[in-house]
Amino acid sequence: MDRRDFLKILGGSGAAAALSGCAQPVEKILPYVIPDEDIVPGVATWYATVCRECPAGCGMLVRTREGRAVKVEGNPAHPVNAGALCARGQASLQGLYNPDRIPHPLRRDASGKTHPMSWAEAEALLAERFAALRARGAGDRVAFVGRLETGSLRRLVGEFLAAIGSMQYLTYEPFAYEPLRAANHIAFGRAAIPFYDIEAAEFLLSFDADFLETWISPVAFARAFARFRTVREGTRPGFAYVGPRLNLTAANADAWLPIRPGTEGILALGMIQVILQEKLVPVSGPERDRVWTLVQGYDPPAVAKATDLPAETVQQLARAFVLPRPSLALGGGIAASANNATATLVAINTLNAIVGNLGRTVRFGPNASIAEASPYADLQRLIQAMAQGDVEVLLLHDVNPLFTLPAATGFAEALAKVPLVVSFSSFPDETTMRAHLVLPDHTPLESWGDYAPRAGVAGLVQPTMRPVFASKGLGDVLLAVARQMGGEVAKALPAESFQAYLQEVWRGHHRRLAPTIPFEEFWEAALKRGGVWEEVPDERVRLTLGGIAAVEPEVAGSSEGLTLLTVPSLQHFDGRGANRPWLQELPDPLSQIVWDAWVEIHPETARQRGIGEGDIVRLTSPFGQIELPAHLSAGLRKDVVAVPIGQGHTAFGRYAERRGANPLLLLAPRAEEASGALPRLSVRVALARTGARSLLASPAGSSQQVGEGVARTITLTELNRSEAEPGPRHEAGSLYPAHVHPDHRWGMAIDLNACIGCSACVVACAAENNVPVVGKERVSQGRIMSWIRIERYLEEGPSFPRPRFVPMLCQHCDNAPCESVCPVFATYHNPEGLNAMVYNRCVGTRYCANNCPYKVRRFNWQTYPWPSPLHLQLNPDVSVREMGVMEKCTFCVQRIREAKENAKDEGRGVRDGEITPACAQTCPTSAIVFGDLKDPQSRVVRLARDPRGYHVLGELNTRPAITYLKRVVLGRSPI
Amino acid sequence: MQPLTFRQVDRDILRTMEPPGRLYYGLLALVLAVILWGVYAWWYQIQTGLAVAGLNNPVGWGAYITNFVFWVGIAHSGTLISAILYLFRARWRTAVYRSAEAMTVFAIMTAGLFPLIHLGRPWYFYWLLPYPNQRNLWPNFQSPLLWDVVAIGTYMTVSVTFFFIGLIPDLATARDQATGWRRLFYGILSLGWRGSDREWRHYRSGYLFFAALATPLVVSVHSVVSWDFAMSIVPGWHSTIFAPYFVAGAIHSGLAMVITILLPLRRIFRLEAYLLPRHFENLAKLIIVTGLIVGYAYLVEFFLAWYSGNVYEHAVFLDRATGHYAPEFWIMVTFNAVLPLLFFIRRVRTSPAWLVGISLGITIGMWFERFVIIVASLAHSYIPFSWGLYRPTWVELSITAGSFAWFLFWFLLFAKFLPSVSMTEVKEQIPEEAG
């Protein structure tokens, strides 16, 4: 063989070896032959829309790259959320790209097997069915149950149903706050949910309203709460939380009063009595007498006996509620969901009214639209009709009653009696899996629509990208069906598409708000802005009290049992978030548990029953039983157990199925008479150990701080005493020359007085930075990948531990311990003060992670998958890391680069506030501020000089770029 | 006993190199099987990622680095015995030093594997080496890991050379007695040694120079290894006593390993005439010294933690003695610091059973010492929220077992192919008239 032959063979065999290595199928790369005018490769396009993950309806901006949505952010112009989003909102992308979405219309045969069908077939089938019913005059045997809609879709569905002769349109929201509506009707003559102005309050009292988690509009409330808690003129208002369980909202209160659940109304009446008795407010004449008759008999000792709170507390609360004013009492959660809920809330309304909070902190006018949802009682009537065979076609849109209704309502049995069940859900949830026809709707990020979360705020929903699957919008389906039915029905709905219908509806807004400009201009402006908003004048309301007395709630089940609290979950709301892996892997702020549900038991109660952490316990109510692992927590009363709502799905995709159990199944089906709500405080449960144990995965190590601690607090007195100088920053010398930062040194300030622990930043970071989800087992092995985490510590209190939250991320130390130990310079200090990470250079010694005192570095123990189409969400500006390399927070360096390039293009410097990392951007309380530490005018420098400022582990001379601001505690009882 | 003659020495020692029996092959097969299993585990780990190990956040180093430090430690007494004791003219080392040196070489060969095994991307291991490249990328000379590469590399080079130089006259003796391919083999290895006066003169001075060169390495190598830990800021690692503490510990474990290996060797090869009880007694006495130093270091660590007033140090040492890793900690204290004190009793240090038993105990104890230092400190660092636990998986245990087999494999080859007692030096000690 000569040299040439040798080389030929070598080359040939080498190529063969290389080719045989390509096991993946060949994918074609398609260039933009005719470029889309909206798409500039490498440049993001933003679309304004509305977040439809819960009825709060926050404004949202969607960042798209090369035609696909990659990130959602709050719309800064939106009056509800002003740029912030919660964890659920951030995770809406994983609804859009959920790998378990229904890809096309499905027909289910008698054996339960599904068969794909075309949209034309589906629409023809529906048209034929409706036409037949209409011809028989049986149009009313069609019922529609959908999620809460307020605008065009609500109108369209209504008109469609009317055209075929049905009146049965229900908007079903599991958390619809019916008692609040009913109580406002009784107390003020308005069956509405007013705007609660937390920011304006000087004292806040929450009767179990979890307004920082799920209640009405949590992002808006969190924003207001952060301002409420700001120290002004040496003081800040107090906040007391009354409720049986220490939830995230209670964890942010100055006092938690663990009241006997359901007796909140009695406490409110007792407070009113004290106020009147002690003449704390000038109420006189007939009004006083009327109120007095109401509260007679509710003297502090009697109230103390009923509520299990000391009599002095009742008096102190009453006094604190009166001075300073305006104060604000909120009623929600368990307080607003027993079968005495309406009475309880009337008492709370009265309390607000007599101290003069009406019109100041309780403002009717900008009313929340959640009050428009149908009460549960309507649904009960529908179930009855279904069970009697009076419903021939049931249309379901994005609701999952099989999961959210108690088993005892008989919904499942009634559903079986309906000959044709049509689900317009995008996801294979429990109810959809029982439907005969599945016609997948677009997710909100692919749809046209509008939604008004409260009066005066009309948000526009627009598609941000082409549909991922062969789904079709509900509005368009109804219009197509109407067209096919022809005749009067087609005449009643002449719009050619739902988009056209929507524009037609918005011509109304145009005529009202801006008749002088052309509609197209108005429409485009509204689309860009995300909707239209207008000031809504406050309605003046008075207390118009009928006779109503607070009573103790009726709770079914053996008196030896423990009262069951079913608590809405921060991550999963009513269960609709359970198929988003980001939310599953988001640690519960208090229990820190991921990917699971649990039953929360007081340690003493558990000890008496021989139950330990992780023991699987059977909960039996008169209506059913479930099994869940026990989690012991001193943050709830000894006579209750709590189970988060949201897990326990039997369908709903790979991420949701077979985790935990659904506590709603245990509830009593009877509606509260006064409001028609489903009481969630309705049963006692018996606990029994099953003998099995289960792993509750959590990323948390110890909850006890060491030394001065990571999460620090300062009392008001100390704060006022301290001089307006920053606290000591340990800065010793170094053997090495100091780093030079010629232009910028990026830094951050995190205000722990603002941080509520809601964890929105954690999901935002995962979305922005392609942080993989690792799953329950890996979390329990200590391999969670999150770049930012909310550490939860428990400070021992006299009777219960007080949670403290601190966001922990890479501190970008000037003197970084990780940098000097890396043998290959994979991590280094860049000239702008960033502790940068070169993934390509990392060999994976993990020395940096060992030497990082903050433990914020994350190692890729393996390559993590993004099941298709979840990978479409990956941010193209951020590399996806492979197995064996270290990663960590970059301060969103891609955003820094983008802002710097923009500034350079415009020939200017980077402006303060121009760069916001994903965590800071989404923070509902603006606790995180990012900026240039070299710019003396920047906000971050001002905050870093705050007397509350400190560096975590500053004594190690790491010189972090992040300054934490101590949380301000009152240092005394707020009441 | 008859005084030894030169001829008898040659006969006795070379007899150990005769073709082995069935037991030897059986042992060799077993050891090879375990090595193969370890290789499989490593291959699996490279395929799947380090996820198959028990490592996590916060415990980024576990069994692999424990093994690394353990084997580097084992490597220590070889040079101590051969070089330092040579310089001090401690005659008793003659009989044991060859095996101890072989042990050194094999232990470094074992230790050197672990930095590779523990890498996230082992295929890029060469980035740790300072070699000129077109990208002008150099490793970070600030990083103790790089010092490690240099220190281990130097130690390996010097100890292999030293080992080989000491072997030359013996290899020549073997060559003279051997036939066939063995003759060729030993002939090449003995570099044409003829035993002339000039050769001997050069040999002696060369050996002395290498002894002098190797001596500081005994101290430096494990000091540098200890700086992997001491130079970091992890509570429980960041301590000024680490260098002497680690050196003493290394010698402690090395001596124990020498006894563990030599006693059976003496029995199997019937070398009772060469490896006298006095030799083992002296080793045991040395172990008392190192054991006392190690015990003292344990106390000082706790004292420093308390005296520093540093809350994190308090927390980590309290956790070490009472927390999740308390059993491992108490194994380490008992086996390393308490058990060797029994050597004060003459009857114990002259009894082969006791010697082997206590030495095995020390070997186990010293493995756990490294485990406790590495794992228990990382598991309990500054941020309480990030405290965690580590437990080795089957992959790590398999690779660990494989490393012991790898070490034994080389030792088995050594015992059959090279004279395990230095004939040259034994002969030197035979009184003139007897020879």
Image (cartoon, coloured by chain):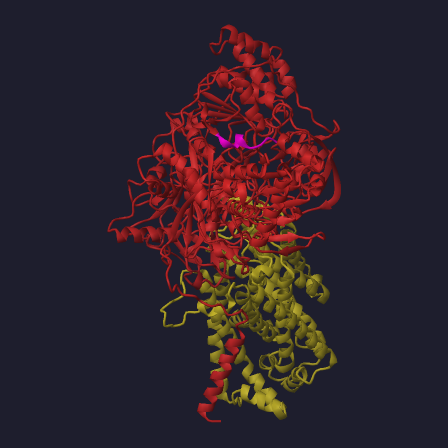
Residue positioned most to the left:
A907
Residue toward you, B254 or A882: A882
Q: Nearer the viewer, residue B369 or A31?
A: A31
Colour used to depict chain A in the structure image: red
Residue sitting nearer the eye, A451 or A268: A451
| Observer-nearest of B162 and B390 | B390
Image coords of residue A652 (percent x, y): 62, 48
Tell me if I can see residue A187 in this picture: yes
Q: Is residue A370 magenta?
A: yes
**Residue most toward the top?**
A285
Please tell me how many numbered marks the rendered image carries: 0
For the point 48% across and 54% down, the residue is A873
In the rendered image, the vertical position of residue B345 relative to residue B322, given as above or below: below
Residue A821: x %, y % from top left: 44, 58
Q: Colour of chain B?
A: yellow
Measured as percent of width and height from the top left, residue B40 is found at 63, 70
| Residue A634 drawn in magenta | no
Q: Is residue A335 above or below residue A935?
A: above
Judge left or right: residue A573 versus residue A462: right
Tell me the magenta residue range.
Answer: A368-375
Q: Is residue A905 left or right of residue A135?
A: left
